[in-house]
Image: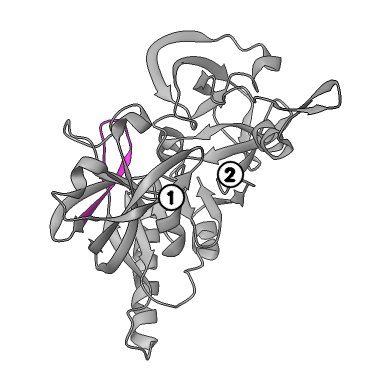
Amino acid sequence: MVRLGIALLNLLLLLAVAERVSAAKTEFPLGPTNITLLRGVQNHLLVPAHVNGHDATFLLDTGEDIDYLQRDRAQPLGVQSLGRQARSGNRWFELGEIANLHIGSLALTKVEIALYDPAQFHGPVPGRKGKPADGILGLKFLRQHKAIVNCRTQQLYLQTGPASPLDLSAITRELGFTRVPLIENEEGALTVPCSFKGKRGNLVLDTGAFVTVFDQKSMRDFELKESATKLSARTPSGRVRPLQVAQFDNLRIGGLPVAPQKFAVMDLFAAIKPVRTSLGINRIQVYDARTVRVKRNVLGLLGSELLYQRSAIIDVGRLALYLK
């Protein structure tokens, strides 16, 4: 039944697109273009594309705020440097420009993209068939095109015209999905409300995380029995930390109960360093209240495996997450 429902949802999406196109009186194509995504070895979603006529693959990553291309791929793909930089978090990246970018039927020109060295991410961006991805498509691109991502069927829908984004609320409700609001926090990340054993917080929606991960410090009060693994992962700040696993029996996402299972636990966030200043002969410590407030409410990252398990549909344009 789940497979039939998902197939029906895809059909209804395409029918809605066709209805808009036939009714539109404009030179611009309306409705979203539909791209079939690839699945990487670590369960990541990958976007096939053409950069200046060359084949390329991008990791679809809702945990990144901007879009990236690996620096040593710039010259082979004909990407020119713009001679200036952009900042993401606490890191600076040189900016390049893609003259022609094609993703499905979407054709873009003069696309700015940040150039990164794998060392800045503590290793290459995961791809498929033993090869790293050429880059990352983050929230900047997904917001611009009001993206809809079907994590189960590996479909990406991109808005290609000025029409308002598709409204999936009625269709998904009929198919038994639960709508969970996506909330932009003060750092620009997309988060979903969650609770665990009565403690409320948020999970960052992160399709670039191959598993759902909870912050070790946030879970400390629950005295979880953590088991060590041989795995490690990169934190949002770029640090590589070991992964442990623990049993979660009372997790809810947006009020929707999640079946008891084991999730990863790690030290996600670096210690918050005080900003010190002097006042007369006394020395005082001042913490960045914005950073403290954001980190305190984030309990972890909602990753690819749970999004796949719950047949998640991410609607970036309307800030909604639909779960089975």
Vertical comparison of 192 with 50: above or below = above
- C-beta proximity under 8 Å, tags 1 and 2: no
- Nearer-the-camera pick, 324 or 223: 223
Q: How many marks?
A: 2
* Callout in the foreground (1, 2): 1
- Secondary structure state at the residue bearing disc 1: strand
Kind of residue indicated by mark 1: Ala
Q: Percent position (x, y) of residue 64?
A: 44, 44
Q: Which residue corresponds to the image point at 66% horizontal and 15% vertical from the top-left?
A: 220
Alpha-carbon neighbours of circle 1 within 10 Å: few (<14), some, or many (≥20)? few
Boundaries of the magenta span: 38-49
Vertical comparison of 275 with 310: above or below = above
Left-right relation of 195 to 121: right
What is the number of the mark on residue 300?
Answer: none
Alpha-carbon neighbours of circle 2 within 10 Å: few (<14), some, or many (≥20)? many
Q: Percent position (x, y) of residue 271?
A: 61, 22
Q: Percent position (x, y) of residue 184?
A: 60, 50
- Nearer-the-camera pick, 94 or 206: 94
Left-right relation of 81 to 66: left
Q: Which residue corresponds to the image point at 21% horizontal and 49% vertical from the top-left?
A: 74
What is the number of the mark on residue 86?
Answer: 1
Is residue 43 a member of the stretch shown in magenta?
yes
Is residue 174 a member of the stretch shown in magenta?
no
Q: Which residue corresponds to the image point at 74% horizontal and 28% vertical from the top-left?
A: 198
Left-right relation of 24 to 225: left
Q: Quadrant of residue 195?
A: top right
Task: Identify the residue under disc 2.
Answer: 191
Kind of residue indicated by mark 2: Thr
Alpha-carbon span between mark 1 and mark 2: 24 Å
- Secondary structure state at the residue bearing disc 2: strand
